[in-house]
Amino acid sequence: MRNLLRKTLLVLPGVAAATLLGAGGVAGAAPAGMQTEPVQTMSCSHSHSNKDSGEGRAKTDLRYRTGPHTSCAAPGQVGKGTLIYYHCWTAGGEAGGKHTWTWGRIAGTQTAGWFADAYLSDGGATKQC
């Protein structure tokens, strides 16, 4: 429960920023005289590292993705009950009512990717990327 609360508190600022940016992915108009750079809201290239030694199972057939958003490519999927070794988690796009994703490796393979925490048996990794 404490890990879920910590994740929620760390994710809320990112969710708020994404909401303020809107669907266009660019922040609103800047005050007169100020130039701003466009802000990317959905990057499929996200850093990760092996900080966590946890593991869990897919609660359903589950696609893994190249980034922590449902709009990122899904090179494959795992079946329900597949063991995933957790590396770390990050905030990302909404999936299954949650905004956190775990970078993990499929047990028995060298295949890794981003898994939506909502579909992992214990809510995903406990260490932030």
Image (spheres, rainbow, N blue to C red):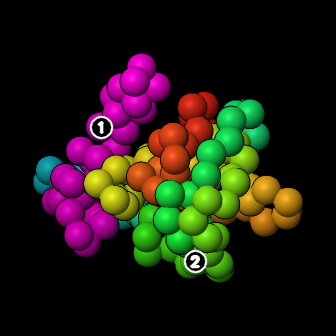
Q: Position of residue 16 (x, y in %)?
A: 24, 44
Q: Position of residue 56 (x, y in %)?
A: 62, 45
**Residue placed at 61% from the left, 59% from the top?**
81
Q: Which amino acid lies under the numbered mark 2 shown in the image of this protein?
A: Ala
Quarter occupied by residue 38:
bottom left
Residue on which the image places disc 1: 12
Decide: few, some or many residues near mark 1? Use Cα within 10 Å; few <14, some 14-19, many ≥20.
few
Residue on which the image places disc 2: 74
- Secondary structure under tag 1 reads helix
Q: Position of residue 18 (x, y in %)?
A: 28, 54
- Secondary structure under tag 2 reads loop
Specify whether residue 22 is painted magenta: yes
How many labels were placed on the picture?
2
Judge whether 118 appears above or below 71 on screen.
Answer: above
Segment tinted magenta in the rendering = 1-29
**Horizontal arrangement in the rendering, residue 24 relative to residue 40 (left or right):** left
Q: Residue furthest front?
A: 81
Q: Do the residues bearing badges 1 and 2 touch, measured as CB atoms within 8 Å?
A: no
Judge whether 82 appears above or below 23 on screen.
Answer: above
**Residue placed at 68% from the left, 42% from the top?**
55
Decide: few, some or many residues near mark 2? Use Cα within 10 Å; few <14, some 14-19, many ≥20.
some
Q: Is residue 122 visible?
A: yes
**Horizontal arrangement in the rendering, residue 88 relative to residue 34 (left or right):** right
User: Is the C terminus in the top left, top right, bottom left or bottom right quadrant?
Assistant: top right
Q: Nearer the viewer, residue 26 or 62?
A: 62
**Residue placed at 29% from the left, 54% from the top?**
97
**Horizontal arrangement in the rendering, residue 50 relative to residue 65 (left or right):** right
Please report whichever mark, 1 or 2, sits nearer to the chain's N-terminal start. Answer: 1
Q: CA distance from mark 1 to mark 2?
A: 25 Å
User: Which secondary structure class fits the magenta region best?
Assistant: helix
**Residue placed at 64% from the left, 70% from the top?**
78
Q: Position of residue 53 (x, y in %)?
A: 74, 33
